[in-house]
Image (tube, helix red, strand yellow):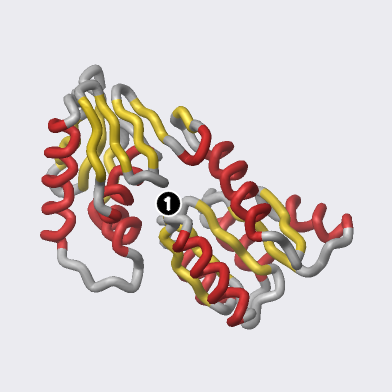
């Protein structure tokens, strides 16, 4: 799962990035509103953690701009403003949840799980486990299970698989997959994506899955069940 963290407190930003990464999340972090808007517009994140009081552009402005651009990524607004009216305003402007500083990291994790569960179109299970057709993916154990066994995936393979699992049956553009898996600041060649598609196809075959990663020439790839 890829998370965008927008927090101008350098110490808090660093601490949250480290803790989230240690829990297996892919984190891109920034410290002002303009950067948050730039990254958010890429529409490659599973969730955005957005500080309300950012320099250059406030978090509420960033959130409003993203919603106007039809970016529907779940947003948790993080702020020191804890009055009821502040919470109502944030939620009315498009936040999916509202977390008041200071907060416990375990509460943040619980809210991330709750918000992302609501946004998934597939069968979400405890601890972030995802299921589709004849496979089950456990991000925490990095384990993919199918009809004839299971196997461990690399971080890149897991991120690629999750991208498909969040949009089963849909064709995902190459550019979107490169951004989603490698991040907006990574200099990666197109051939790397093709290599990892090949690796993932072998993984699916090895566990006896009937799912197929289909190539749509000139567009990208899609994870499809045999009846699609």
Residue in the foreground of this view, choosing between 16 and 161: 16
Q: Which of 129 and 141 is in front in this view?
A: 141
Horizontal relation, residue 201 to residue 132: left or right? left
User: How many numbered marks does the figure carry?
Assistant: 1
As displayed, is residue 76 above or below residue 185? above
Quick check: 62 left or right of 149?
right
Label 1, residues with CA under 10 Å away: few <14, some 14-19, many ≥20: many
Residue 204 is situated, as x and y percent measured from the top left of the image, at 19, 34
Question: Which residue ends up furthest to the top in the rendered image?
Answer: 227
The quadrant in which the C terminus is found is top left
Residue at 56% in and 78% down: 31
Report the residue at 28% width, 71% height from top: 186
Label 1 SS: loop
Residue 115: percent from left, percent from top: 60, 44
Q: Residue at x 46, y 28 (%)?
A: 123
The x and y percentages for residue 203 are: 17, 38
Q: Name the residue under label 1.
A: 1
Residue occupying image coordinates x 17% and y 51%: 196
Q: Quadrant for residue 208, please give it.
A: top left
User: Toward the viewer: 138 or 118?
Assistant: 138
Relative image position of residue 121 (x, y in whole percent) = 47, 32
């Amino acid at each position: 799962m890829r998370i965008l963290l927008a927090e101008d407190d350098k110490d808090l930003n660093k601490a949250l990035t480290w803790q989230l990464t240690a829990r297996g999340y892919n984190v891109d972090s920034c410290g002002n509103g303009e950067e948050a808007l730039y990254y958010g517009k890429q529409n490659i994140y599973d969730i955005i953690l957005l500080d309300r009081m950012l320099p250059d552009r406030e978090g509420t402005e960033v959130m409003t701009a993203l919603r106007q651009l039809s970016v529907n990524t779940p947003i948790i607004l993080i702020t020191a403003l804890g009055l009821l009216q502040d919470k109502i305003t944030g939620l009315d402007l498009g936040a999916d949840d509202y977390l008041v500083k200071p907060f416990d990291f375990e509460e943040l994790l619980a809210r991330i799980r709750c918000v992302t569960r609501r946004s998934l179109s597939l069968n979400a299970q405890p601890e972030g486990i995802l299921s589709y057709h004849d496979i089950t993916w456990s991000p925490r154990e990095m384990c993919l299970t199918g009809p004839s066994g299971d196997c461990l995936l690399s971080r890149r393979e897991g991120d690629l698989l999750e991208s498909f699992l969040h949009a089963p049956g849909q064709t995902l553009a190459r550019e979107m997959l490169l951004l989603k898996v490698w991040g907006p600041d990574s200099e990666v060649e197109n051939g790397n994506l093709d290599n990892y598609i090949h690796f993932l196809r072998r993984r699916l075959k090895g566990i006896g899955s009937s799912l197929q990663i289909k190539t749509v020439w000139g567009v990208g790839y899609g994870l499809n069940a045999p009846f699609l």
